[in-house]
């Protein structure tokens, strides 16, 4: 009997054949179950039946159902269930790739982007197995993907996980995004392997500054590139709003505590008069020490004149003023929280844990203490969803989060990677990118992002250009690409070997430019293999698209199947100073570190507050392995100065600033914005690259 009751509780459809159906207790059948009453059929042996007038409160009861009708309805229910089950599982992609017609000479990135008509984003979503209720469409070519997908595909095995990093770059960048896009175009459009690119959203600072956009380039781009490089779906604006709301809450709280008595602070207690003065103070006051505030306002524009400001100068602020600064928006801890979180619940907890200052007793003050956690989460509720776009060849791309690697942790979101790994299936590939050089972007990918996500890369692609190798080998700057001497290449060997040895990279990609000679390319490939690379492959995706990276795609596939020897660089339980020293010596090649008194004081404070067991996120120039941008190649025997240390507790790392590193970039002599314009007749953007 107990087994029968259990079956009835679990049933979606119940067929009654009892001569006395009214005697079946309703508690045996779950509300919402469809009940087919065929008891008269069983008694008479006929296909038709009459109403028995049986009523089942809360159930979907049908009194007059023949056996044949019942069988058909059950069959329909089973067929519907099978369809639903298939939808919940990973399905083979039915991707229609877009054809390229490369031109020579290669046109501008903007011209190439506009010459290709992207698929409607809802079509792309369906092709890769997304359900209609799992996307939120923005315009024609962008959509946000809901996190419910992770629950639907939780039993699906992950695909292969590949990181694209680079050697220490020139100021113009060395093409990691372009290689990432070219690689997935080769994998999917030319080798018929499911693949996903996961990229960061570009900041408007470099877009209008010196570096330009970050959609890739040539015939390996994310399209439409104008939408990619500008506002996208507003995630960075949401981060800016949330960051500055918290900054306003800090200063407002200090102002009101300085100018109001405890009894004017709105204490919500049954009997406030029963509290002592000390109890009222503990309940109402945070007693923030203004000298310890580490939370800065942010703006997504390069503006050197906001590096140091004075706030609170208006008479209405009653004499409360202090020195402060602006950071660029992508350096906000909220950006790091977005990039490292794995769920909405986790993001809310991380936002609440963010430490903004210390109180006058030396205890940390958090966003939760200020009562702003809920409001921050509301502002970030849509930003947490990855943005779906496509490459020039119609393969899928997630664009999500955009921290710089020199002043933040420099990687796209954990959520984008995890969703993509489910969508590609067990035999597919997810290719993600780490910002700037391997010394900062890849080091942080390994020691911060992989710790947070629990994911381990199957292979690493290290992007090297002859241009950058010449510069680091003692050759001319990036504007003078002259043939290299033997002496220059001897130094190149040292530079490339250092990157490979420190990170055990599996594949080296040589990104080719028009001025590179065959001899230079062959020599770099030979040196890379000699230094320990699994393979070294020249690529031509910039000029001809994914077809030009098929050899790289095959090398990556082979390398990813060889097994990983991944391990973290340091134990997080080491003291903060020792973790900083390990990175400086093992990755940068420094002899030792030197802490400023302020940096030492903050390390002592964070350790006392219980934050000593977090990983390290170094803020350092991307133009050199050292702290000095003009020290090229592989500097040795230098002392790395640590000028300041911050704590990003919500994101989950300690944040040392190296040398004179600024978290607000400035504009160059001739910024990119001089070339950017809008055609007011066609409404097309001009001058982006």
Image (cartoon, helix red, strand yellow):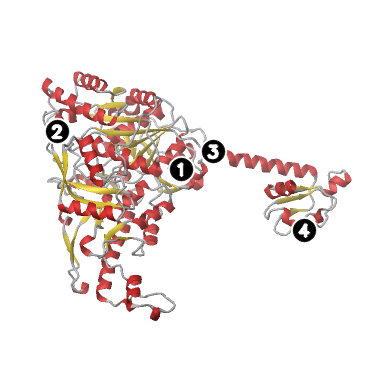
Report the number of numbered marks. 4
Q: Residue 121, percent across and down?
A: 43, 42
C-beta proximity under 8 Å, tags 1 and 4: no
> CA gap, disc 4 to disc 2?
87 Å
Q: Quadrant of residue 637?
A: top left
Write down the residue under mark 2: 636
Marked residue nearer the N-terminal end (3 or 2): 3
C-beta proximity under 8 Å, tags 3 and 1: no
Crowd tier of the residue under label 1, counting other residues whose Cα lies within 10 Å: few below 14, some 14–19, many 20 or above = some
Numbered circle sitting on residue 277: none
Marked residue nearer the N-terminal end (3 or 1): 3
Q: Residue 307, percent across and down?
A: 17, 55
Per the image, label 1 sits on a secondary structure element best described as: helix
> CA gap, disc 3 to disc 4?
38 Å
Marked residue nearer the N-terminal end (4 or 2): 4
Write down the residue under mark 3: 89
Numbered circle sitting on residue 55: 4
Q: Residue 74, percent across and down?
A: 71, 43
Tell me: 469 left or right of 387.
left
Relative to 410, is 325 above or below? below
Tag nearer the camera, 4 or 2: 2
Crowd tier of the residue under label 4, counting other residues whose Cα lies within 10 Å: few below 14, some 14–19, many 20 or above = some
Tag nearer the camera, 3 or 1: 3
Point 28% across, 27% down: residue: 509
Q: Is residue 217 visible?
A: no
> CA gap, disc 2 to disc 1?
53 Å
Write down the residue under mark 1: 122
Q: Quadrant of residue 87?
A: top right
Per the image, label 3 sits on a secondary structure element best described as: loop
């Amino acid at each position: 009997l107990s087994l029968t009751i259990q079956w009835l509780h679990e049933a979606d459809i119940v067929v009654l054949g009892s001569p006395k159906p009214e005697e079946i207790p309703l508690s045996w059948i779950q509300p919402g179950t469809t009940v087919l009453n065929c008891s008269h059929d069983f008694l008479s042996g006929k296909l038709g039946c009459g109403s028995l007038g049986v009523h089942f409160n809360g159930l979907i009861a049908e009194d007059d159902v023949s056996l044949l009708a019942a069988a058909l309805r059950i069959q329909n229910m089973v067929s519907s269930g099978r369809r639903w089950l298939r939808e919940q599982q990973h399905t083979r992609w039915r991707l229609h790739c877009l054809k390229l017609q490369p031109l020579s000479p290669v046109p501008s990135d903007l011209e190439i982007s506009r010459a290709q008509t992207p698929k409607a984003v809802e079509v792309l979503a369906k092709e890769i197995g997304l359900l209609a209720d799992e996307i939120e469409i923005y315009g024609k070519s962008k959509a946000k993907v809901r996190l419910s997908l992770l629950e639907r595909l939780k039993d699906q095995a992950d695909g292969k996980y590949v990181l694209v990093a680079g050697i220490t770059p020139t100021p113009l960048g060395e093409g990691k995004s372009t290689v990432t896009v070219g690689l997935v175009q080769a994998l999917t459009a030319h080798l018929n392997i499911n693949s996903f690119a996961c990229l960061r959203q570009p900041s408007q600072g470099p877009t209008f500054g010196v570096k330009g956009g970050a959609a890739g380039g040539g015939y390996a781009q994310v399209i439409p590139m104008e939408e990619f490089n500008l506002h996208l779906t507003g995630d960075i604006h949401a981060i800016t709003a949330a960051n500055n709301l918290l900054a306003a809450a800090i200063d407002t709280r200090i102002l009101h505590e300085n100018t109001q008595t405890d009894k004017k602070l709105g204490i919500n207690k049954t009997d406030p008069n029963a509290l002592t003065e000390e109890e009222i103070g503990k309940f109402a006051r945070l007693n923030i020490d203004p000298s310890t505030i580490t939370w800065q306002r942010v703006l997504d524009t390069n503006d050197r004149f906001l590096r140091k400001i004075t706030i609170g100068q208006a008479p209405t602020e009653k004499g409360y003023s202090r020195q402060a600064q602006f950071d660029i928006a992508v350096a906000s801890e909220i950006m790091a929280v977005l990039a490292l979180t794995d769920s909405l619940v986790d993001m809310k907890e991380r936002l609440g844990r963010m430490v903004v200052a210390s109180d006058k007793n030396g205890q940390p003050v958090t966003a939760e203490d200020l009562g702003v956690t809920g409001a921050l989460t509301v502002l970030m509720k849509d930003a947490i969803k990855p943005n779906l776009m496509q490459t020039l060849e119609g393969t899928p791309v997630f664009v999500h989060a955009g921290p710089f690697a020199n002043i933040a942790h420099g990687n796209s979101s954990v959520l984008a990677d995890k969703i993509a790994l489910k969508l590609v299936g067990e035999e597919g590939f997810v290719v993600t990118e780490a910002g700037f050089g391997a010394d900062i972007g890849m080091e942080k990918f390994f020691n911060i992002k992989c710790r947070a996500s629990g994911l381990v890369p199957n292979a690493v692609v290290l992007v090297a250009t002859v241009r950058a190798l010449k510069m680091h080998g003692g050759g001319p700057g990036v504007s003078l690409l002259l043939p290299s001497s033997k002496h220059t290449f001897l130094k190149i060997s040292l530079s490339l070997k250092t990157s490979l040895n420190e990170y055990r990279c599996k594949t080296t990609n040589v990104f080719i430019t028009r001025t590179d000679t065959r001899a230079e390319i062959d020599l770099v490939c030979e040196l890379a293999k000699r230094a320990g690379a699994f393979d070294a492959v020249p690529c031509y995706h910039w000029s001809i698209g994914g077809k030009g990276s098929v050899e790289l795609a095959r090398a990556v596939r082979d390398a990813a199947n060889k097994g990983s020897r991944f391990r973290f660089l340091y134990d997080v339980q080491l003291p903060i100073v020792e973790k900083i020293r390990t990175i400086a010596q093992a990755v940068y090649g420094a002899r030792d570190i030197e802490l400023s008194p302020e940096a030492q004081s903050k390390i002592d404070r964070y350790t006392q507050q219980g934050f000593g067991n977090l990983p390290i996120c170094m803020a350092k120039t991307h133009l050199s392995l050292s702290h000095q941008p003009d020290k090229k190649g592989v500097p040795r025997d230098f002392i790395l100065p640590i000028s300041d240390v911050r704590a990003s507790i919500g994101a989950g790392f300690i944040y040392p600033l190296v040398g004179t590193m600024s978290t607000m970039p400035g504009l160059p002599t001739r910024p990119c914005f001089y070339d950017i314009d809008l055609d007011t007749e066609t409404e097309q953007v001009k001058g982006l690259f």
